[in-house]
Amino acid sequence: MAEHHSVSDSKHKASAANIGASLSGNGRTSPAGTVGSSPTGALSTGIAQPAGWQSLLSFTILFLAWLAGFSARLFAVIRFESIIHEFDPWFNYRSTHHLTINGFYDFLNWFDDRAWYPLGRIVGGTVYPGLMVTAGLIHYVLNLLHITVHIRDVCVFLAPVFSGLTSISTFLLTRELWNQGAGLLAACFIAIVPGYISRSVAGSFDNEGIAIFALQFTYYLWVKSVKTGSVFWSIGCCLSYFYMVSAWGGYVFIINLIPLHVFVLLLMQRYSRRVYIAYSTFYIVGLVLSMQIPFVGFQPIRTSEHMAAAGVFALLQAYAFLQYLKDRLTRQEFQTLFFLGVSLAAGVGQHCAVIYLTYTGRSTQYAKIHIPIIASVSEHQPTTWVSFFFDLHILVCTFPAGLWFCIKNINDERVFVALYAISAVYFAGVMVRLMLTLTPVVCMLSAIAFSSVFEHYLGDDMKRESPPIEDSSDEDDKRNSGNLYDKAGKVRKHVSEQEKTEEGLGPNIKSIVTMLMLMLLMMFAVHCTWVTSNAYSSPSVVLASYNNDGSRNILDDFREAYYWLRQNTEEQARVMSWWDYGYQIAGMANRTTLVDNNTWNNSHIALVGKAMSSNESAAYEIMRSLDVDYVLIIFGGVIGYSGDDINKFLWMVRIAEGEHPKEIRESDYFTPQGEFRVDKAGSPILLNCLMYKMSYYRFGEMQLDFRTPPGFDRTRNTEIGNKDIKLKHLEEAFTSEHWLVRIYKVKKEENRDPLVHSPRSSSSSRQKYTSKKVQDHPQSITPLPSSLSRINYPLPSSLSRIN
């Protein structure tokens, strides 16, 4: 059965290769005997052959795709400068810088005392080191070649460089699935598609920048190992999987998709020795290699995400054992063993399905109820239909057609791509961040759809000039033309029917369809360029606004504030902020933070959220217990920045309520009508909490324009309710130019509580005031006369310096 599939696949590949050769500039394929027939002109003959021109054209298209993808990701560098973007890339850059200075061994044992004060963080055991090691290795090689490059520039341009490698790996994978023409189209698609550019622009030094290349290359090697059954390709697949494990936590997608592919092949009765060799080698070697990453450790044999792979491995061994016994037992004995094997397989399959559904069921609906810190991240929200079209454009409409072509001409590797597409669509719908895993398969299937259309409409004349090879049944009919009867199952075509099938499509239809396809591709290219330029090429640490005349204003408040922290605070100063800004404070300001974007300790984050949600006195006690020196907040009420801390405040309340339900309740921050308002109708608890006071301190005195009253919040479009804000335990230390970043210094605790003096009474019946000590011990201490009580006795110099 497996040999039958391989033969049919090779026939299809051969016909597809001939069509691809015709599309690359030559009408027909030359006979095999003419290749290399003249020894004197081997080079010129090789170039003159269709295969030579096809290879040159493929290389040129891949190079241009790499160049286009690299250039499209440079908008941020051209418009701003070579700078690290977003939040997580700052930690990655800081870790890579530590790696290049101190070495790999010290990096694995690095204890970061500037993070999660007072707990700290063991960096080597809590990160995927593949990104840092890749950047550090490139930096080392460049310096070895005496090319002086700063590690920051290597980090900035790493993702655009790897986008070209992703295009090549996508080309290789699509070529194995369909043909070379579809592979070239897929490489061009993934080079400029916004769904991938959003994570790989220059400056986005994040794990996904190299992980998508590792993902596609692992899938290519897996398909190659299934088609060949070679241990060599299987070991290559394991090494690529190891690199993927070291780079990104999304490796779980691979370790679930490949076992699912093998399981479906068994259900479809497509078992073969090739599948057995490929998966057995992949599972054993890949399991051992993945456990070498310190952050992964023994998870592949303990966690539920990896149990499906183990279950399919056991099922495959049982199925292979049954196939081995089939030739060595009687029919009755084999039926008994087969029944037991099927029962075992059903149990294992059901177990794997439960585990897989448990893993995939971790949606945002579950997180909103049980894990608010996960639901608070915007990347974890469900994907909208607008996001699908925005990131994929016309590919959303064409990729189902490519999936239909693969299912219509099914084989082992196309079963894999069909499962890849279905599972990726589901995950992308659950979480907008996983749109990244859907983008490669959409590009591949859309390329197959476009390639099939072009082959049908552009290759029609070629089919009439070089008719297809006649099958064996037609040759038998020619030899036995005198037979009176046809062979069974053979239906002779009428002469007029044969003429109709040989007639090509009209030139008008071909021209119209070709022009429509080219217009769609042109619109796709324009959309990708526009989205990349306007939506995905703005670093979060540098904002830009445009005037009515088109001139641009740069808002550099973030770096201004971080530079102030670096220059004007003590080196060991501790800064409290919400966890979003922890990596940036540590990376740019080089100061100790309480929480950051790692979010590994929910209790510590909840304590910070409790401080932000409480009144100033209660928050001061928390800050003193954590040795906080400065508090940093983001406020967008002046410029209309919607990503400030007031808009994130409810998530602070929800996270704090999860750990401290008696002190913090979300309902207390809403009005009786259930509204979250910052004006006079807002909740009194909200108007007096620490976050509200720090955000709107002195803001009630500011009038932004003549059309709005003082204290008008442009982000919430309302006038604030508490304009007379007084701070007792905090003092304003720094406010950026556009009030985007505000930093407050925590006052030191006083030596003693100040005495409260009542005003003197002018009445004749004067009340005697006694000190607290006299009130506590009225019999032991006699009060001084009023004439002596007002005398100030100076202390000796030796005692005046005692605190």
Image (spheres, rainbow, N blue to C red):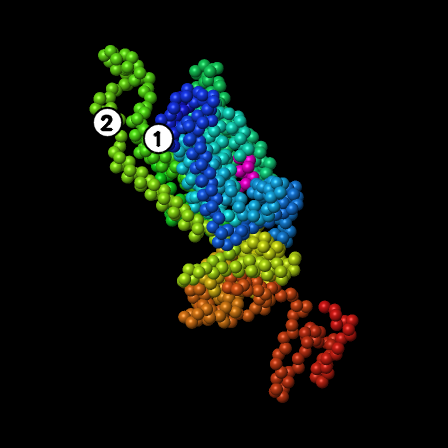
Q: What element carries label 1?
A: helix
Tell me the CA gap for discs 1 and 2. Answer: 24 Å
| On screen, residue 442 above or below 121 | above
Residue at the (50%, 71%) spot, across then down: 701
Q: Is mark 2 on a helix, strand or loop?
A: helix
- Residue 232 to residue 387: above or below: above
Q: Quick one: label 2, few (<14), some, or many (20+) residues within 10 Å?
A: few
User: Which quarter of the picture shows residue 628?
Assistant: bottom right
Provide the major secondary structure of the magenta segment.
Answer: helix
Is label 1 in contact with label 2 (beta carbons under 8 Å)? no
Q: Name the residue under label 2.
A: 500
Residue 792 in percent (x, y) is at: 72, 80
Using the image as rendered, state which of residue 530 and residue 669 is in the foreground.
Answer: 530
Q: Residue 435 carries which label?
A: none
Amino acid residing under circle 2: Lys
Where the N terminus falls, by quadrant?
Answer: top left
Quadrant location of residue 12? top left
Residue 271 visible in this rendered orientation of the protein: yes
Badge count: 2
The stretch drawn in magenta includes residue 207: no
| Label 1: how many Cα within 10 Å (few below 14, some 14–19, many 20+) | few
From what the image shows, is residue 577 above or below residue 429? below
x and y, in percent, of residue 475 in the image: 31, 16
Residue at the spot of label 1:
408
Quarter of the image containing the C terminus? bottom right
Q: Is residue 467 left or right of residue 118?
A: left
| Residue at image point 42% right, 34% down | 57
Residue 502 x, y percent position in the rendering: 26, 26
Mark nearer the N terminus (1 vs 2):
1
Front-most of residues 289 and 650: 289
Residue span colored magenta: 241-250
